[in-house]
Image (spheres, grey):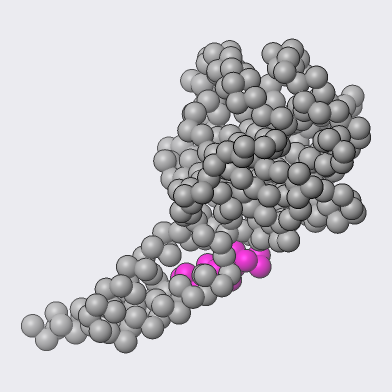
Amino acid sequence: MNIFKSTYVVLRSIIAIVIPLLLVFGCIITRYFENVWSLIFSVILPGLVVLNGLLFTVFIFLKRKDAFFAGFALVVYACSHVLFFNFNFDNHNVEHDNLTLLTFNVRGGGGAGHTSDRTQIKPRIEAITNFVNTQNADIVVFQEFWTIQKHSFDNYPYSFVGKRRGISKSLQVILSKFPIVNTGYIDFPNTSNNAMYADVQYKEEVIRIYNVHLQSFGVEVDSEFFTQKGLEAVYPKIDVGQKMKSAQTELLLENIEGFKGKYIVAGDFNATPFSETYRLISQGRQDSFLEKGSGFGGTYHLLSYPMRLDYVLPDKSFQIWAHENFNLKWSDHEPILVKLTTNNY
């Protein structure tokens, strides 16, 4: 009996220390680094938060001093990262004029990218087109668009199609109901990913719209993924991808800092809210989900696990009135629709 009791005490002590340590370590590495481990912890961090919350509650109930470790880890998380679940009861439409923006990585209409989905490209494109036209947003930013033909979106007289002769990039598009007075690219080297911007004449001011598609890993999570051979193949891809994403983030921020007007950063960051990428890009800006979103805000599902990889981040001169997530399953990413106004209106 003493052996079982001693084993229980040892296991309880290990759990009480190891799980909080994992959360603290995860908070540190995801906040300050971009590597394989930071990616792993950025995915599992919500689970570690939940586990520590349960430990803290149980130990408090049992009046155990072990509650200190879990409590400390939760404080570290609260001080270093944003919430992964949001409660919002004030997500409403505005009576007066507002600017609406929709961001959507459509993956060429190819769904989740599996071979079986390729036969469904045409109906998926039709469904996505109908959805976008029905939402009727003022501005639409697409990542991984399917074609340079945009006649299906007749509601948008102005557009910026990211297609250039001799430059091979994943196609990005900005559609606008308002005049586009200037356009430009933020070219990411040695990749098909990229960022672009369009300066839109909105009423009496110009607003820059950034359409961002940061580095992806080109990794499919399938039956081969969790084998030793699969992991050995994936590891270098993730390591290189994380380093490229850091460099791309620097290029993006340089352009943002050089622009003196109002702007909105939107698109697919391929990074969770617990990553250094998100921390740097969101710093000094608003996150529409945190302001007006509800639930997990997932825009990408990894084996049914919701992850927030797509964002709309306006500067602080905007007032965010609504944020809506959709569950369409026509692409590997889901769209976001945001309604906002500038402080001048």
Seen at 78% across and 42% down, the residue is: 210
Q: Would residue 86 be found to the left or right of residue 35 on screen? A: left
Q: Would residue 174 be found to the left or right of residue 27 on screen? A: right
In the image, the segment drawn in magenta is 22-34
Q: Would residue 261 be found to the left or right of residue 287 on screen? A: right
**Percent position (x, y) of residue 298?**
50, 44
**Percent position (x, y) of residue 295?**
45, 48
Predominant SS of the magenta segment = helix
Asked whether residue 117 appears in the rendered view, the answer is yes
Seen at 58% across and 43% down, the residue is: 322
Magenta span includes 345: no
Seen at 69% across and 13% down, the residue is: 152
Magenta span includes 25: yes
Quadrant of the rendering where the N terminus is positioned: bottom left
Image vertical order of residue 73 relative to residue 3, above or below: above
Q: Nearer the viewer, residue 98 or 73?
A: 98
**Percent position (x, y) of residue 156?**
76, 21
